[in-house]
Amino acid sequence: MTLLVPFDDSPLSRAALKRASEFAAFMDTEVVALTVIPDSTDYAAERGWLTEQTPSDIEAIAARLETKAHEIAPNARFRHEPLDGEDDPVATTTLDVVRKIRQVAHEEDVEILFVGSENAGRVASPLSSVGNPLSEDAAYDIHIVRHAD
């Protein structure tokens, strides 16, 4: 069994990774922390990924986020995927990120997806949330983390 956690170092993604790690320890299974990194300085800046030591460089951002993920879940396997925007020229960045998460979930044969989201499953949800579109995929179970500890 594999558990997948989309991880962007937000409070909810940190909580989701922590809970997935606890669940994995109980079930003796693997956790994969996944960061999708669009080729967009604005996207990286909005998430606080850019620092003087971590410029807008995908590998540098990934290394920093891997360190953060392992602080929360030392046994998790970290995976990062670049997103160059060539998937669908009319799709939003959020939809491209969702597609990449789904692709990785299928590649990793994921059984449970742990998603940190305040609004997944609600009737109305923001266009910037990956939680709601991911919760619609019936290929895996979803554990939605709505509150950061």
Image (tube, rainbow, N blue to C red):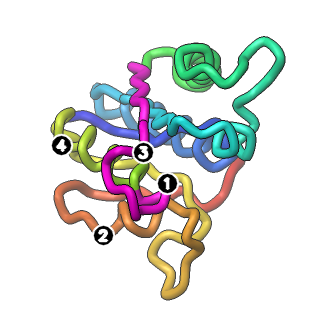
**Marks 4 and 3, how far apart at CA:** 20 Å
Q: Earlier in the sequence, mark 2 or mark 3?
A: 3
Q: Nearer the viewer, residue 28 or 14?
A: 14
Residue 143 percent coordinates (x, y): 41, 56
Residue 98: in magenta span: no
Q: Which mark is residue 93?
A: 1
Q: Earlier in the sequence, mark 4 or mark 3?
A: 3
Q: Earlier in the sequence, mark 4 or mark 2?
A: 4
- At 58% from the left and 63% from the top, the residue drawn is 128
Q: Amino acid at mark 3?
A: Gly
- Quadrant location of the N terminus? top left
Compared with 122, 50 (above or below) is above
**Which stretch is magenta?**
77-95
Compared with 148, 53 (above or below) is above
**Marks 1 and 3, how far apart at CA:** 7 Å
User: Residue at label 3?
Assistant: 85
Q: Amino acid at mark 2?
A: Glu
Pointers 2 and 3 in contact (C-beta within 8 Å): no
User: Residue at label 4?
Assistant: 106
Q: Which mark is residue 136?
A: 2
Q: Nearer the viewer, mark 2 or mark 3?
A: 3
